[in-house]
Amino acid sequence: MARTIAVGVALFLAFLVIRAPAGLIRVFVPEDAPVGLFELDGTLWHGAGDLVAGGQRVGRLGWSFRPVTLLSAGAGYDLTLTGDQLDLSGRVKAGPGGTTTTLNGEIGAPFVNVWLAPYYIELSGTFMLEDVRTEATGLRLDDVSGSLSWDGGPISYRLSGKLYRSTLPPLFAALGPGSVATVYARGDATPLLHAALLENGFARFGVTKYLTRMLGNPWPGGDPDHAVVLEVEEQVF
């Protein structure tokens, strides 16, 4: 009799776990987190929700649990993120050694421009992600790799209160090793932009003289094209 009750309780608990609603995700997300999920549907294992970051709706995030990841002492999900000018798919796996993610897909410039608006920058075109892989421990980004490219086109930006317009060729970012990236024009070995995510939660961007020339507003002085002539930092988290 006791064994029958124990089996029944175990089955009941298993049913509760399997049917755990997606709304339970909010229990694991701190109230002061920079991202949130709303309008949740489904369960913890297969569901969807509206992803919001920095007060802006990013898109509809869908997830599906991958049981095979349990064999390597981790928990993994297949992910999709879709929205206006946004179509991404990938995987995430969390385990004792940290979290790894892989992303593929497209991001339209109008989506990116929402985040660039505070800096008075507006782009056109499409960004392509191919096997962009990140490895992180907690909030620290340990490594990034893969391919990130932009098909180029018109760009406008404001500098010292004046509006400038230019056109850039197709660009690509060399990702890693570590948490750095370097941007180049297709077929050109001279860097245009250096980026790095720092351990203090800030992102650092360095603009080279070559990029200022390419934008039609060359930096004065005798610095070589590859020299960083303007550097800024922005808090990410």
Image: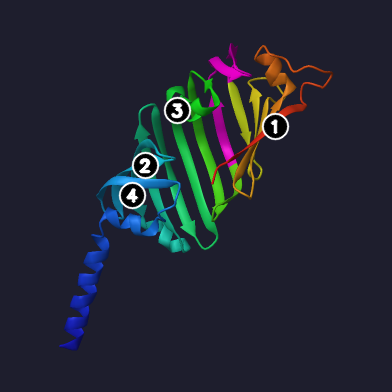
Work out whether mark 1 precedes mark 2 in sequence or the reverse, and give the earlier one.
2
Q: Which residue is mark 4?
A: 64
Calculate the distance from the C-alpha at mark 2 to the C-alpha at mark 4.
16 Å
Asked if 132 appears above or below 40 in the picture, the reply is above
Q: Which residues are magenta?
A: 145-170
The disc at residue 114 is 3
Q: Nearer the viewer, mark 2 or mark 4?
A: 2
Q: Which residue is mark 1?
A: 231
Q: Secondary structure at mark 3?
A: helix
Work out whether mark 3 precedes mark 4 in sequence or the reverse, and give the earlier one.
4
Question: Which kind of residue does numbered mark 3 sit on?
Answer: Val
Taking the spot 23% from the left edge, 65% from the top edge, the residue there is 16
Taking the spot 20% from the left edge, 71% from the top edge, the residue there is 12
The disc at residue 51 is 2
Question: Which kind of residue does numbered mark 4 sit on?
Answer: Ser
Give the overall secondary structure of the magenta segment: strand
Work out whether mark 4 precedes mark 1 in sequence or the reverse, and give the earlier one.
4
Q: Secondary structure at mark 1?
A: strand
Q: Secondary structure at mark 2?
A: strand
Work out whether mark 3 precedes mark 1 in sequence or the reverse, and give the earlier one.
3
Closer to the camera in the image, 50 or 1: 50
Taking the spot 50% from the left edge, 32% from the top edge, the residue there is 129
Question: Which kind of residue does numbered mark 2 sit on?
Answer: Leu
Calculate the distance from the C-alpha at mark 3 to the C-alpha at mark 2.
15 Å
